[in-house]
Structures are given as C-alpha cells and as structure tokens.
Image: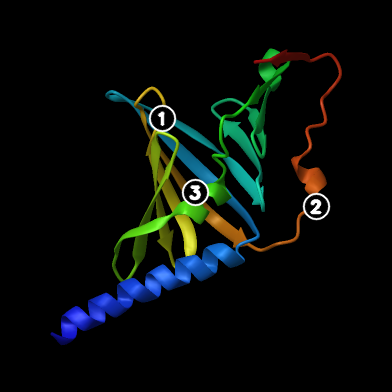
Amino acid sequence: MQLIIRHFLLIMLSHTLLLAYGENLNSFEAKFIQTTYQGKEKIIYQGSLIAKRPHMAKWIYTLPLKKEIYLNENMVLVYEPALFQATISKLDQNIDFFSIIKQAKLESSNQNISIYGAKIGDTLYHLEIKDDLPYRIIYNDALDNRVEVQFSLQKINIQMPDSTFIFHPPEGIDFIEQ
C-alpha cells in the first residue's frame, strides 16, 4: 500500500511540476537532433532551437542542409539558403513549443522521465521531461512519418530580444507565399 501511495504522490508531484514549470517557462534554447523515420529509412537533422513566449520560435538547421524556420503565432517562414528562397505560409493553428507544453497532460512517470501528451489538431505530441527540462518530443507528421526531436544543452528562461525571431533576408532571394 505504501508503494502505491508513493507512486501516486510521485505522479501528482510530476504533474504539478509540469504545470508550474510550463506556466513559468518563458524561453527555451537548446541544440537538437531530429530523426525522421520514413518507413525503414531514417533521416537525421541537427541544429538549434530558440523559443520565447507566447508563440515565437526559430529552428536553425545546420545538417544535412542549412535551413532556418521562423514561427510567430500562426505564420511560418522557411528560409533555404541553398535555394535562395524563403517560403511564407499561414498555419491553421499554433504548433509551437509552448503550445505543446501548455496542452500537455501526464501520461506516465518514473524517477527519471515524465511523459506528457498534447493533441494539437490531428497530431498527438509526446513530450518527455528529464531532470526538469524538455528532453524529447515525439510525433507522427502529416505523412505518418515518426519524428523524434531530442534536445541537449537546454537553457530555460534566458533573456532574448524579440528581434531574434525576425528574418533579415539577404539580397537577391525569392519569396514564395503559400
């Protein structure tokens, strides 16, 4: 019985920590490795993420190709230097880092990792928290590919100006609106 009570208290504490943690999380910075599984093939991307409340994020891909993705509420800009172009799109809903954390509900927990789920639109995101820091996000994309984004060198609540999330286009690139 004592083990059951201890497990229950651990789950409640983890849930409370995420709610408090998520509510008090104002910015996030980390390196990432993104693995996309397309059938038996896997594609690995690397880069860094910076995000700031309420809905700003910048994904900087460095490998295998350079790419920058700017998210601001329901607008996304994808800059591909190798193609000399930037694509601007409007999203139906906010699918940024903070939206996932805000909607996350505890699914399971142990001493090391708590796993939360958040459904945004038709996509179910699984967020793993390790050592009180976002550690990994797992989901299936629109093409039903499994995507895992693992974070390292995480920093939370650091100061970052809003100008960090503004795209400054180099001369001569094409803009495509979708």
Q: Which mark is residue 161?
A: 2
Instruction: Verify CB contact (< 8 Å) between mark 3 and mark 1.
Output: no
Q: Which label's residue is closer to the chain start, 2 or 3?
A: 3
What residue is disc 3 on?
Answer: 100
Q: CA distance from mark 1 to mark 2?
A: 31 Å
Lateral position of residue 9 relative to residue 122, left or right:
left
Locate residue 157, reporting x and y percent: 66, 63
Instruction: Verify CB contact (< 8 Å) between mark 1 and mark 2.
Output: no
- State the quadrant of the N terminus: bottom left
Nearer the viewer's eye, disc 3 or disc 1? Answer: 3
Q: CA distance from mark 3 to mark 1?
A: 15 Å
Query: Which kind of residue does numbered mark 1 sit on?
Result: Asp
Neighbour class for label 3 at 10 Å: few (<14), some, many (≥20)?
many
Residue 66, image quadrant: top right
Lateral position of residue 130 relative to residue 91, left or right:
left
What element does badge 1 sit on? loop
Query: Which kind of residue does numbered mark 3 sit on?
Result: Ile
Lateral position of residue 108 relative to residue 90, left or right:
left
Most distant residue in the right direction: 171
Lateral position of residue 99 relative to residue 82, left or right:
left
Q: Which label's residue is closer to the chain start, 1 or 2?
A: 1
Most distant residue in the bottom direction: 2
Question: In the rendered view, would you say 63 is above or below 89?
Answer: below
Can residue 132 be seen here? The reply is no
| Residue at 35% over, 57% down | 115
